[in-house]
Amino acid sequence: MEFALIATPLLLAALSALIPSNRLRPWLLPVAGVVHSVMTAFLMARPEVSAGSSWLYLDPIGRVILPLVSVLYLLCSFYAVGVLHYRHNQANRVFCVCLISFLGIMTMVLLSQHLGLMWVGIETMTLTTAPLIYFNRTPQSIEATWKYLLIGSVGIALALLGTFFLAYASLHQGIEPTLSIEGMVRNAPMLSKSWLHAAFVLLLVGYGTKMGLAPMHTWKPDAYGEAPGVVGAIFAGGVTSCAFFALLRVYHICLAAGEGAYISRLLLVVGFLSMIVAGLFMVGQRDFKRMLAYSSVEHMGILAIGLGIGGPALFGTLLHVVTNGLTKGVLFLSAGNIHRAYASKNTDQVHGAIHRLPLSGGLFLAGFLAVTGSPPFGPFVSEFSILNGAFDGGHYATGGFFLLLLLVVFIGMGATVLRVVQGRAPAAVNKSPYREGLLTTVPAVLLMMLVLALGLYIPATLTALLNDAVRFLKV
């Protein structure tokens, strides 16, 4: 089943390259999404159908993140069909091939039980997603694509070096080197501490670059600002979740080695730095898509802080991966609709969105409230769980500073969002041909409903999955 989960999207991507029609080809996106969701649900419900490979299987951490990626892709795929039909004059072959392939590659990362294979998956994600940023064919989008490739390549090179250091931590102690996750966790107490420390720093910088943690975040504002909204949604909810998954692998090995205190300090520093940078750049931000990029930097910082706090906050941290991924979907999809209607991302031209596009404007406002941790939405529950974990663990200063930065982000982001949704839309914008359609609004509505539902009630199944993952990480 694991091989089928990876191979099916790749085969559909190859098929999409052969379809000549610009109108028919996009429908393979939701086909891939539906098939992948059904197969994921089947594997979750019937783990005994696993292929039994030691390199590819779904463990407790993957069981939390794979369903998120599958659901997010499924809803975004229908939205993508609406967007590509609106822009039917633009060639979409490369876009469809890359977006469908991307689903298979993300799945490979989440199933991989080998550090080398996982690294290959993350690197392939970089190469596959780069053409998606260039979809609009503007000078700004080509610049964003190159910046993404260059910074991402440096990050992934450092991650490879860190992986070698991790293997050498075994060799240095006379242990047979292995890159399998199970073997590394088993041998962790015997690894060379100095090589393990160096490896963690390199892997934190490497995979932190893919997550967009500060100060390695500089590709994000350009890439998220220039990519289509649907690509931004999958980047913010899929790519970053896969990169965080890779970091969790390293975190797991370091915890098993008894190095929790060492990695905790580094994670807290990087996490708070990310929240500070995001808060500063959100204040006075006029480009609402770049604002969403900084929001993503902030939430990657929250995940790093949650890991840094450790035990009591792990449940909330893993829940935040889910709630943040879904909420980012709402924000980027609604922002994409607003961008198309106004042909601008600047708040000097974009205002009155709630009148011009009532549904998208309302979703953008609701998404802002959710992503900033306001009740009764899912991120409120996950962020509150992290905060509760900080106070339960005696990290009072950490909890207090975390609250202060959340307030700064709320004020900075709120000013930009209110400029977008309030006021009167310019007369020229009211005459623009873009109108909200079922395909470009229903996916965002469904994502918003999921975000709201997770704020009101966390299903017992999800609670059990999160608790299993926490126990798994604690070894």
Image (cartoon, rainbow, N blue to C red):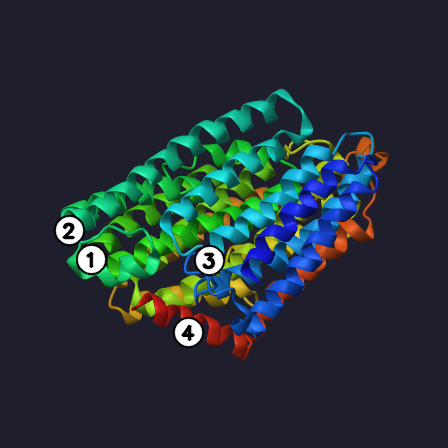
Work out whether mark 2 precedes mark 4 in sequence or the reverse, and give the earlier one.
Answer: 2
Q: Amino acid at mark 3?
A: Leu
Work out whether mark 3 precedes mark 1 in sequence or the reverse, and give the earlier one.
Answer: 3
Viewer-side label of 2, 3: 3
Describe the element under mark 4 as helix, strand or loop. helix
Q: CA distance from mark 3 to mark 1?
A: 27 Å
Q: Amino acid at mark 2?
A: Lys
Q: CA distance from mark 4 to mark 1?
A: 22 Å
Describe the element under mark 3 as helix, strand or loop. loop
In the image shown, does 348 or 4 lie closer to the viewer? 4
Viewer-side label of 3, 1: 3
> Which numbered dot is residue 467?
4
Q: Please give the residue where the numbered disc 2 appears in the rendered image.
A: 193
Pointer 3: residues within 10 angstroms few (<14), some, or many (20+)? many
Work out whether mark 3 precedes mark 4 in sequence or the reverse, and give the earlier one.
Answer: 3
Work out whether mark 2 precedes mark 3 in sequence or the reverse, and give the earlier one.
Answer: 3
Count of numbered badges drawn on the protein: 4
Q: Is residue 131 visible?
A: yes
176 horizontally vs 352: left or right: left
Q: Please give the residue where the numbered disc 3 appears in the rendered image.
A: 56
Q: Is residue 405 visible?
A: no
Viewer-side label of 2, 4: 2
Indicate the position of residue 408 as horizontal and vertical percent values: 43, 48
Q: CA distance from mark 3 to mark 4?
A: 22 Å
In the image shown, does 300 or 130 lie closer to the viewer? 130
Q: Are marks 2 and 1 in contact (CB under 8 Å)?
A: yes
Q: Residue at x 52, y 61 (%)?
A: 322
Q: CA distance from mark 2 to mark 1?
A: 8 Å
397 horizontally vs 109: left or right: left
Q: Please give the residue where the numbered disc 1 appears in the rendered image.
A: 259
